Image (spheres, helix red, strand yellow):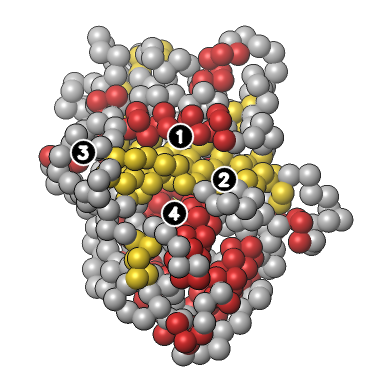
Amino acid sequence: MWTPNEIASLCYEHYRNRLPKQGKPEPNREWTLVAAVVKIQPIGGQPCDCRDEQEQVTKEVVSMGTGTKCIGQSKMRKSGDILNDSHAEVIARRSFQRYLLHQLYLAAALKEDSIFVPGTLKGLWKLKPDLSFVFFSSHTPCGDASIIPMLEFEDQPCCPVSRDWAHNPSVEARGNLEATEDKRKCKDLDSPVAKKMRLQPRTPARKVANGEAHLQSSGDQESSPVLPRVGSSNLTSEEPATAAGMAPSGAKVVDVYRTGAKCVPGEAGDSGKPGAAYHRVGLLRVKPGRGDRTCSMSCSDKLARWNVLGCQGSLLMHFLEEPIYLSAVVIGKCPYSQEAMWRALTGRCQNISALPKGFGVQEVKIQQSDLLFEQSRCAVQTKRADSPGRLVPCGAAISWSAVPEQPLDVTANGFPQGTTKKGISSLQARSRISKVELFRSFQKLLSSISEDKWPDSLRMQKLETYQEYKEAASAYQEAWSTLRKHAFGSWIRNPPDYHQFK
């Protein structure tokens, strides 16, 4: 089929060759993150779930995003023309939605070859049965998945992470590259990192690892033991607040990587204690802002939501018989824990049942590559050595979609790069993956299809605003309501008046 390194290599090559210089980090001064969606299709029409590991497949990047920023609450706009969240994973997913819209247009309006085939119900479509999609990110998602242990080392360069440790309800994490930006320097990932840490009184400084877990890079998910269920709803401030127990390998957890994402109001909250008791795991978190709090949920939370509701969003569900799910998530070389990834993306939603037909908690395959992204913070830090000046995250974000017209979109602060204050409300000042532009593409799709061929959800009522179209996707909204009820009750939702544009 494919390996994590093949997926990472394909995405890095696409980044180098297909993305413009504009929007990329300034050499030796800036870093960024990259994420992508890769289409997997067996050669010869064999189904993607074929058990033959040697089955040949084609791999194609269909969307890509870069970025590390999101805007504060005070900069949000009710016109839908600004990108609230420009983290790479979110840009890649919105770019994927643009790709899906184009593929639906090919199938429904132009009757041309597409990834979609007619569904069983009138006006609905479904993916070709041999297709699947793999999500790639050069770094672990910010939030819960980045709360990773630091282990005491003796002879081994890296220890596997304890599954028991990953489900302790209170742990600390240090150095999430998406959130803490300039606070720490990153050492060479191929050598142990010696750090002095304050532990218990009279405890000497210890050697700890960088958190990377090579041993998980190609593990068989099906052979793993069943993991305990972890959800934010069952975590309380009275529960144990330590992660300094011994791992099965004999390496002691001496600290953990911290995420800059903050617990949402209504959650139990982090303890803030020093050492391995700083964070609680399994909680919903919002991305940090510089002074101005954001309303953007962490990438860990968003990936967990996509794993239940699909990546297509509510608008596209009007045309789809079932959600578009990711079959796998591949992470590049970085501090990593297989257990933390499982907990963040899947484990928190294990108790959810009674979802509408077609929706479900997916057992997504999670793997890590050992290929480092060349413009990651760690890679740039290693190259620049003792260069003067501070290493900072790149302020721009790049969107790329596999569409024939204007596939690229470079933004900064939520608007196309170069947008002036005077030009903010113009049509030229809209990102092609902003809410209003994706809605415009959806309306274009709708207008290209005769009304008698529309799905029932669109023919039964007159809809005008973005909010009305979203709410009319009843199965999707029911699934989202169930997810919030059972797992994500504290999820921050934008008020309806931010979705009233037409």
Q: Which residue is depicted at the point 71% across and 51% down?
A: 415
Say which label, 4 or 1, has the lower sequence index.
1
Nearest to viewer (mark 4 / mark 2): 2
Residue that appears at 71% across and 57% down: 430
- Identified by mark 4, the residue type is Lys
CB of mark 4 within 8 Å of CB of mark 1? no
Q: What residue is drawn where x is 40% and y is 24%?
A: 371
The kind of residue on which mark 2 rests is Trp
Real-space CA distance between mark 4 and mark 3, rounded to the nearest whole angstrom: 32 Å
Precedes in sequence: disc 4 or disc 2: 4
- What's under tag 1, amino acid-wise? Cys
Q: Which mark is residue 55?
A: 3
Whole-number angstrom distance, CA of label 4 to CA of label 2? 20 Å
Characterize the local packing of mark 1: few (<14), some (14-19) or many (20 or more) Cα atoms within 10 angstroms. Answer: many
Mark 3 or 1, nearer chain start: 1
Residue 185 vs residue 97, the one in the foreground:
97
Above or below for 441 versus 248 = below
Q: CA distance from mark 4 to mark 1?
A: 21 Å
Q: Secondary structure at mark 2?
A: strand
Q: Which residue is mark 2?
A: 400
Q: What whole-number distance in Å separates the C-alpha atoms at marks 3 and 1? A: 21 Å
Q: Quadrant of the C terminus?
A: bottom right
User: How dense is the environment of label 2, judged by Cα within 10 Å: few (below 14), some, or many (20 and up)?
Assistant: many
The N terminus - image quarter = top left
Judged from the image, the secondary structure of the residue bearing numbered disc 4 is: helix
The residue singled out by tag 1 in the image is 11
Q: Which residue is mark 4?
A: 302
Circle nearer the N terminus (2, 3): 3
Residue 342 rendering spot, x and y as whole percentages: 28, 44
- Quarter residue 462 falls in: bottom right
Residue 276 % position (x, y):
36, 33
